[in-house]
Image (cartoon, rainbow, N blue to C red):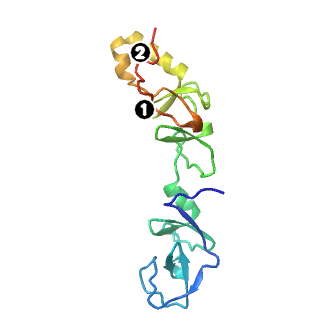
Amino acid sequence: GTRTPPHKQMLGLGGGHSPAMPGSVCEGCQRVISDRFLLRLNDSLWHEQCVQCASCKEPLETTCFYRDKKLYCKLDYEKLFAVKCGGCFEAIAPSEFVMRAQKSVYHLSCFCCCVCERQLQKGDEFVLKEGQLLCKSDYEKERELLSLVSPALSDSVIPAAPHCPMPQGGLCHKPPEARGRYSSR
């Protein structure tokens, strides 16, 4: 199954009815629950009518997502809180395989060079420059062109970029000394 991060809790609503205890307070409206039954979700108590999406206000009848003491339907939760792809800016489902470069996360199909559009694979060397991925070859071409225009500018235009072969798991770590790793001719 999918792992649920601590800030996100998917809750099944079936069988959550309990007899209301005197003085029980609803997490949704903060009022005393005087109804005959209440719903218990994630160690908090709710009126049945208060179990609705905090965003679209639709009643939540089978499942819900819980964050910051609020309930959400799946669609609104993903819209508001899902991790977004650094390439296409669309949501990434928790079950999808991804590639990571520094703090950015990408769909596998979006993890490609912005110049030649070649999909980058685990182990490929690449540069993440101003939020865009460049393969080693296109980065070196760009750097060589810049050095021909102005040798003094080539280092300042392209700062020490994180060139890195991606180790296990696709994580990119900046090497201790990135400047000068690729030399221009």
Mark 2 or mark 1: name the one nearer the start of the chain: 1
**Residue at the image point whose x is 44% and y is 89% from the top:** 23
Q: Is residue 106 above or below residue 14?
A: above
Q: Which residue is mark 2?
A: 146
Q: Check whether the beta carbons of the residues at disc 2 and disc 1 lie within 8 A of each other.
A: no
Q: CA–CA distance between discs 2 and 1?
A: 16 Å
| Element assignment for label 1 | loop
Q: Is residue 6 above or below residue 134?
A: below
Toward which corner of the image does residue 148 lie, by quadrant? Answer: top left
Name which residue type carries label 1: Glu
Viewer-side residue, 19 vs 90 = 19
Toward which corner of the image does residue 38 lie, by quadrant? Answer: bottom right
Name which residue type carries label 2: Leu
Q: Is residue 62 above or below residue 8?
A: below
- Residue 138, given in percent of the width and then of the height, sits at 53, 20
Label number found at residue 6: none
**Residue at the image point whose x is 49% and y is 40% from the top:** 104
Label number found at residue 130: 1
Viewer-side residue, 142 vs 124 = 124
| Element assignment for label 2 | helix
> Total marks drawn?
2
Toward which corner of the image does residue 32 lie, by quadrant? Answer: bottom left
Viewer-side residue, 53 vs 64 = 64
Q: Is residue 180 above or below residue 73?
A: above
Q: Residues within 10 Å of mark 2 (few under 14, many from 20)?
A: some
- Residue 33, given in percent of the width and then of the height, sits at 47, 87
